Image (spheres, grey):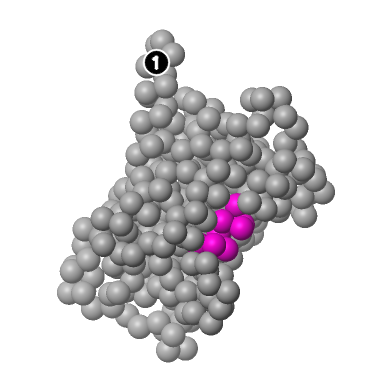
Amino acid sequence: MNSNQALIRGASPLLATAMIWGGMFTVALAVLRVMDAFHLTLVRYAVTALVFAFALWWKEGRASLAFDGRGLTVAFLGTLGFAGFSLLVFGGLARSRPEHGAVIVATMPMLTALTTWVVRGVRPSRLTLASVGAAFAGVLLVISKGHADFLHEGSAVGDAMILAGALCWVGYTMGAASFPGWSALRYTALTTLTGTGAIALATLAAIELGVSHPTRLDAIAAVGWQLAYMIALASVFAVLAWNLGMRTLGAANGVLFINFVPVTAFAIRAVQGQPIGAAELFGAALVIGALLVSNLAPRLRLPTGVSAQDSAVRLNGAGGQ
């Protein structure tokens, strides 16, 4: 395989994945008009967990489905990554806008650099910190739309929930490093299974508290293709495609494609005729620029400390969103 073929083979699945994840926020918003975040998350990951469990059994054998005495750790990370991430992100999305969610989630490599600093004491370089600052300035512009009184708007709460969900995913992906003997598929499958159990318990509790309400089957059928998109494309296909592309191009190159997530989300909203202000566009450009600088700097032999490519390795090991 020559270099051009390798580039196409790696770039194609990564671009497809980024565009699917970018579109996921708009699709999820349509589903959230019918199902709440609890039921959407439960349906999505119940099916996804079964698919990954079957794939793990088929590829690595029945023994790979065992927890090897680490069930509590797996359950904690699965709860953090799938229950925490999805319930917060989708719950926040119901109070915010798809393009806001896409921009905030795209900062996860930056969040990983900061979390690694706090948890492991590995200080990022000045360049990485400057990139982090620029990225969060961009996020602030997107969610505020350039207005100082944005905290009084309803979307601020939703955006904060999405940010908290992104932090949950960062913790989940960093947890993959504590399972060096497990394949990415095994880590993903077993944490998805335990995470789905946590989602089911959270949904039952929410129903008992009156926070969540069961959705009628005819209402679910009305958003059938959107659910299929969330499960088949955004969960199963995108994870496999992301892993394939990352293995082909490497983490430093592959993570650059995460920039297409907010680009796709903004493009879809523009096509739908939703107004997008100059401050939001400039903020998204700041986030994308910060991600590019943080990832391209090492190739220019600039010290970056813990940067976005480090988080890309962890994201790749965890298997995507």
Q: Is label 1 in a helix, a strand or a loop?
A: helix
261 to 9, vertically: above or below: below
At x 50%, y 49%, the residue is 285
Percent across and percent down for residue 254 are 50, 33
At x 25%, y 60%, the residue is 272
At x 80%, y 45%, the residue is 123
Residue 57, quarter of picture: top left
**Is residue 213 found inside the magenta-colored segment of the image?**
no
Which residue, given by chain and number where applicable, does mark 1 sit on?
Answer: 4
Query: Which amino acid type is shown beneath numbered disc 1?
Result: Asn
Magenta highlight: main SS? helix
Q: As rendered, which of 285 and 222 lies closer to the eye?
A: 285
Whether residue 173 appears in this view of the structure is no
Whether residue 305 appears in this view of the structure is yes
At x 42%, y 89%, the residue is 210
| Residue furthest out toward the front | 278
**Is residue 16 left or right of 193 when viewed as pictured?**
left
Name the quadrant of the N terminus.
Answer: top left
First to last magenta residue range:
135-143
Percent across and percent down for residue 71 are 61, 56
**Is residue 140 found inside the magenta-colored segment of the image?**
yes
| Residue furthest out toward the top | 2
